[in-house]
Each structure stands twice: as structure tokens, then as C-alpha cells.
Image (cartoon, rainbow, N blue to C red):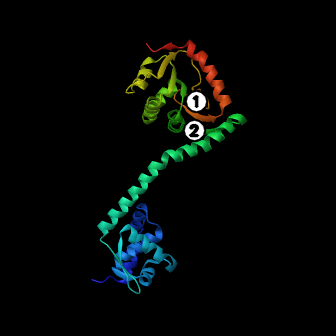
Amino acid sequence: MEQTKDQLNSNNNNPKLLASLQNLGLTEYESKAYLALLSLGICNARELCAQSGVPSSKIYTIVEKFELLGLIEVQQSKPAKFKALEPSLGVDRLVKNKEREILSIRNSLPLIESELESIFSKQIEKMGRDDEPFFNLQFGMKNHIQKHLRYLADARVETISYFETTCLLGAKVYGHSVKREIINNIQLNNISSKVIFGTENKELVQGFLKGLPNSANIELKITKQIHAPFHVIDKETAIVVVDNPLFQEGRIASIHVVGRSIANELHEGYRSLWDSAKGLA
């Protein structure tokens, strides 16, 4: 049965279908033209423009692309006429084309990453010379762990950490996925990691470590010396916290600082804490 004009317009303006076709690699105009072709059956360029709303200046480029992709057949008449192939064939060919595109992108990723890293490293060097710190402030334990401690998983060389009771209690609630990311980075990239637990509660420490794989790169110590928690990543960035002195489990804020001067100061101070701490026995 022949479709009415309203039915055709409804098909061509289906937002879900348009979005799906664009996800498969078609532009908005191409998606509208393809739906119009499926609706019309056989049509010429003028009819296709009228049905799809695609400007006439673009329609021939679009149908040429469709022919190359294997979505349509073209009748070499005057005027030329177009017919869409079965949708199952069309979708399959769009998917395969998208897969080839993704594979091409994946193959070029090492070069892209190298070039981006080169650009980024230059500004890091400049930042190191200027030594003007940049900081990001987050409020609460959840943001501290999920937004700031996650930077430990980006370390390239070394991390040092000082956890105390508040940190360990917070990690029980918010820290499971973040801990796995950090451990995976340590193991995959041979990151040196030192951790001091500033607490007398060894049971709490064992609970924090439960389920985590052993790694020769991770050194663990414990101390009764209570200190404000902090972390240093690659001697370039640091994470420091502000806790509520009247509420043991209350983390007011977390500060991620990008600045070698501050990071180095904390790194130097960590040595004395490490030397005075004891191994986990």
C-alpha cells in the first residue's frame, strides 16, 4: 500500500532512527536522505530532496556516497533514479564501514598519543620552570576518593601515600574501584609505591588491603604517629586533605595541587615518616 505524505514525513523525522544512523557514521542530511529513500522506493533527485529536506546542492554528493557504501542502486537515466537496497544489507554495510573506521583510528592512536604527549609535556616543563601551582578543590570524602585519589592510577614512576583512620573508613564505602585502578597501574607499569598507615588499628588496615593482589612494587608500613593525610605522584602533583577535627569520619575537603615545589617538599618530608614507621607484621 502506498504511504501517505504524513507517513513519509513521520519516517524521515524519527529522532531515534536519525540518531542511530548518525551513530553508524552518517551525517544528519545523509540520515534523512537514507530514510527518505527507504520510504519512497524508487525516486529521482528532485523527489528525494522534497521528501528528505536535503538541499539540492548536497543531494548528488550524498547519493554518490550511498552508492559507494552499497546502500542503493542507481539507474543511469535522465533524470537518474535511485532505489534503496534491503535495510538489512544497508545496516550491515554501515556497520562494517564503521568497524573499518574504528580500526583505522585504533591503528593511528600511538602516533596521536605521541604527538599529544609532546604538546602536553612542553607545557608541563614550562609549568615546572614557572612553578606556579594549580589546584582543584573538592568537598567531602566521596569526591576526595573518586575524583582525586584516582590520580594515583595515572602515575608514571612513583607514588607515596599517607593514610590515616579517616581515609581507611572512607575507602570502605567509596574506594573499591579506585583501589583496583591504582593497583592495576602499579602492576602494569612497574610503578614504585610506598604507603604508610597512620593508625593503631591493624584490623582496619587489613580490611583495606583485603582482596588486593600482592605486588613487589608496593611497600607498606604502619605508624602510631598521626599526621595529616597526603599523597605525592611522580614528584609533580600532590593531594592533601582538610578533615573535621571534631568528627573522625568527616573529610571537609580535598585539594589536588599541580606544582613541583609543593610536591617535592612533601616528598622530602615523607622520608622521616617512612624511616620512623614500622613494617606490617
Compared across the picture, whether 98 is left or right of 262 comes to left
Q: Quadrant of the N terminus?
A: bottom left
Question: Residue 139: x and y, percent?
Answer: 57, 38
Could you tell me if the residues under marks 1 and 2 are in contact, i.e. CB atoms within 8 Å? no
Q: What residue is shown with label 2?
A: 139
In the rendered image, which quarter is residue 122 located in? Answer: top right
Toward the viewer: 31 or 69? 69
Q: Is residue 177 above or below residue 279?
A: below
**Which one is earlier in the sequence, the residue at label 1 or at label 2?**
2
- Determine the residue positioned at 50% across, 75% down: 58
Question: Residue 213: x and y, percent?
Answer: 39, 26
In the rendered image, which quarter is residue 216 located in? Answer: top left
The residue positioned farthest toward the front in the image shown: 76
Look at the numbered disc 1 and give the secondary structure of its residue: loop
* Disc 1: CA contacts within 10 A as few (<14), some (14-19) or many (>=20): many
* Disc 2: CA contacts within 10 A as few (<14), some (14-19) or many (>=20): some
Looking at the picture, which amino acid does disc 2 mark? Phe
Compared across the picture, whether 176 is left or right of 161 comes to left
- Determine the residue positioned at 34% across, 64% down: 91
Q: Is residue 140 above or below residue 96?
A: above
Q: Nearer the viewer, mark 1 or mark 2?
A: 1
Q: What residue is shown with label 1?
A: 234
